[in-house]
Image: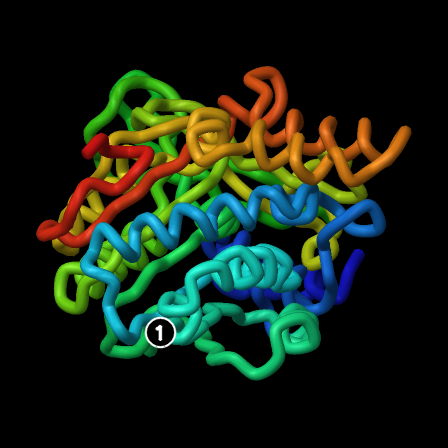
Amino acid sequence: MTKLEEIIAAMIEAEGPMPVDRYMALCLGYPQLGYYMTRDPFGASGDFTTSPEISQVFGELIGVWLLNSWAALGSPKKFALVELGPGRGTSMADILRAVKAVPEFAQAVEVHLVETSPVLCNLQRKKLGEVHWHNTVESLPSLPSFIIANEFFDALPIQQFENQAGRWFQRCVGYGDGNLKMGLVPAPSMQGEDGLHEISPVSQAIAEDLGAHIAKYGGAALVIDYGHLKSSAGDTLQALRKHEFVSVLDSPGETDITAHVDFEALAKAFILGGAELLPMLTQGQFLKSMGLDLRTEKLAAKLDGQAREDFKAASNRLADAAQMGNLFKVMAVAQKNRQPIYPFEEA
């Protein structure tokens, strides 16, 4: 039993069954013991690998998108480039390298990172130098903002409710016989078909805040994550450890816990805040539209043998429909007064 599991068990014994969202928040963010508070989880030696760590091309193409979006919004002379959950800083480093091609953009940009992990903040500082850090989106500057969120919303806590023939229950974590256990407790009636439904109030609150920020100060946001375009019943809560799926109750604080993003609910929250939703794309569609194949071939030409094949395979992994290309979706929102933003809108 981990130290955090002991704390959670004591909370349950004192207060009763713990809703899934609170359990998830404690597992990931408990001070000194939560998963993201204590480790670098990325790469072969960690528990999972994100797109920026797979290929530099991913961040570079986001940089190209940012240049296009900045121009579509009138090329503001000063703006915030914001990344939510920036990991090791790999994506931001690749983005900043790509945008150096346009000096006016590079001179106007002010980098802001939203990060709660002390470990990852230190890694970001080593890679990026001194930028601006925030614990929440509420302290972002009063500037036009271009916001990137890659695999950010999937790590935010979710609530789970189950409809059994018209009777509603909330999924909670209990404790008994020395073990954490998943179970159901009665809940107020809701709307929805039979089955298990997931809601992320914290995700929706953040999206609404960002939508309001964009509506007030201008800018755009790019959200890339795995999930479903339409809200639907189903259990997507999952845990990873050493690149293998494990129980969400396994080793609290030492296991990554995520859930698929409900893009329909997220889009509604951005719109409620005041931003305008652009047509959705898959990650494969987005990356190919931004020049994935051409950029990959150009960089691969500088390599030889297995290094070249590995580099091409990495790009293919990002966009291939059977790998990450279709599972990952790309959602963009923007201020209402602007020129079309490629590749979501045609000029």
Q: Quadrant of residue 86?
A: bottom right
- Does residue 344 appear to the left or right of 9 in the view shown? left
| Residue linked to disc 1 | 108
> Furthest-bottom residue in view?
130
Residue 1 vs residue 222, the one in the foreground: 222
Q: Quadrant of the N terminus?
A: bottom right
Amino acid type at mark 1: Ala
The image shows residue 115 at horizontal and vertical percentages of 52, 69
Residue 332 visible in the shown view: yes
- Residue 171, percent across and down? 45, 39
Percent across and percent down for residue 220 are 27, 54
| Residues packed near mark 1 inside 10 Å, few (<14), some (14 to 19) or many (20 plus) | some
The reply, left or right, for residue 327 in relation to residue 80 is right
Q: Position of residue 308 (x, y in %)?
A: 81, 32
Q: Indicate the quadrant where residue 331 lies.
A: top left
The residue nearer to you, when weighing 245 against 226, is: 226
> Does the rendering let one see residue 26?
no
Q: What residue appears at the point 71 percent right and 50 percent down from the top-left corner?
A: 255
Against 322, residue 67 (above or below) is: below
Q: Is residue 296 above or below residue 88?
A: above
Asked if residue 38 is positioned above or below residue 343 in the image, the reply reads below
Q: Is residue 234 left or right of residue 303?
A: left
In this rendering, the answer to whether 224 lies above or below 29 is above
Q: Identify which residue, 113 or 261, lies in the foreground.
A: 113
Residue plotted at (50% across, 39% down): 259
Screen quadrant of the C terminus: top left
In the displayed structure image, the side of residue 253 where residue 283 appears, left or right: left
**x 69%, y 54%: residue:** 252
Q: Secondary structure at mark 1?
A: helix
- Name the residue rendered at 47%, 39% in the picture: 225
Which residue sits furthest right?
A: 305
- For the residue pair 147 and 188, the one nearer the viewer reads as 147
